[in-house]
Amino acid sequence: MGAESLRQLGQALLLIPLGLILLIMLADLLTPTYIHLGPLLVAAPAITAAFAGPWVTGGIGLLAIVVEVLIGAHNGRLGTQTVQAELGGMAVVTVFVVVFCLVRERERRRLVQVRSVAETVQRALLRPLPERVGPLRIASAYLAAEAEAQIGGDIYGAVRTASGTRLIVGDARGKGLAAISDAAVLLGAFREVARRRPELREIVADLEDSARVSLGEAGPEPDSAETFVTAVIVDIPDDKPVVTAVSCGHPPPMLLRQDGRVMSLDSDRPAPPLGLGGLGRQGFSVSTFPFEEGDLLLLYTDGVVEARDSAGEFYPLAARVASWAETEPRALLARVCGDLLAYVGGRLGDDAAMIAIRRDGAVTSPERWRGAGRT
């Protein structure tokens, strides 16, 4: 809701305490003198504090006190202890709700500042993926589990090399700042080593070293032994209709063939998650799969396939995409995001990140492109 809509809503809500004051005043004046409704005026500033700022709330409180004085004068009871006590109580309540509004406004301004900082961090760390990279068309999506969150422990990124494009999708265990820090370190390391290292095996080994060092510097947390990052790293050459992939404890990529088949690109020997210290250069396999013109490759985090409906059933990603006719990356991800949120009832239990890649052809001299990614 925009600022103008909020202002109009506040003006409309202001009619409630004003109408209440008018109603109580008329009722008190029209009823017998032994029926005294003035104390009910204290509800007006209390109601106003729920939606208005301190100045408006104080003004409504002051108006209620003035009306109480007028009622007391009309009934000839202004000098009585009862009316004076009611006026004093109304003044105290007004002061309290005004102080409450002041504190709330201060916290609201602080929240705005925090969000501004978060947006600045996001712009610095989360570079959007381009729609076109060499012979590939790419779309990305990020669904945060927290309604106000814009960054989390899930990552995705891409780096252009002299021979093709390398991409990563990963998920740092846990939530909060620690997960964001681990994810950012891994994404920064990927952007660096993906350009320098010729082989995926070397890239994964370097990422393991970076993750282990980063997690080791985090300090002796109670669950530090269980801190790790799952990821899948893929290499798509420009001049060959294949994709090479390494899975580090991560859900396997999904390949949507032109003929409608959906293939799960499972590795024979997946690597363990990054940061656990159990990765050996020969302890995992680098798998190669066909990736021809017109095929769609879908990379995703476990927040997608581990999402549950009201009956506790996991989201059937493979069955869903197999039943759809989308052939464009952006359209596919839009369909998945909408269907996923509907499946879980509008609220995810974990962050979800996805990349969809379509091969449109081959290029012989790939342009240089700077890496991009999102945490």
Image (cartoon, rainbow, N blue to C red):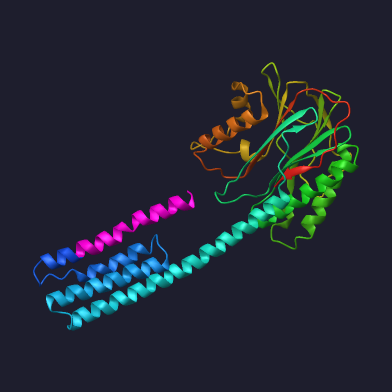
| Residue at 28%, 79% in the rendered image | 88
Q: Residue at x 70, y 18 (%)?
A: 258
User: Is 80 situated above or below 231?
Assistant: below
Q: Is residue 117 above or below residue 279?
A: below
23 falls in the magenta region: yes
319 on left or right of 219? left
Tell me the magenta residue range.
1-24
Magenta stretch prevailing secondary structure:
helix
What residue is at 62 percent from the left and 28 percent from the top? 331
Reply above or below: 19 against 32: above
- Counting from the top left corner in percent of width and height, residue 129 is at 72, 39
Q: Is residue 110 within the magenta segment? A: no
Q: Nearer the viewer, residue 253 or 297?
A: 297
User: Where on the picture, by quarter, is residue 216?
Assistant: bottom right
In this figure, what is the number of numbered marks? 0
Q: Nearer the viewer, residue 160 or 252?
A: 160
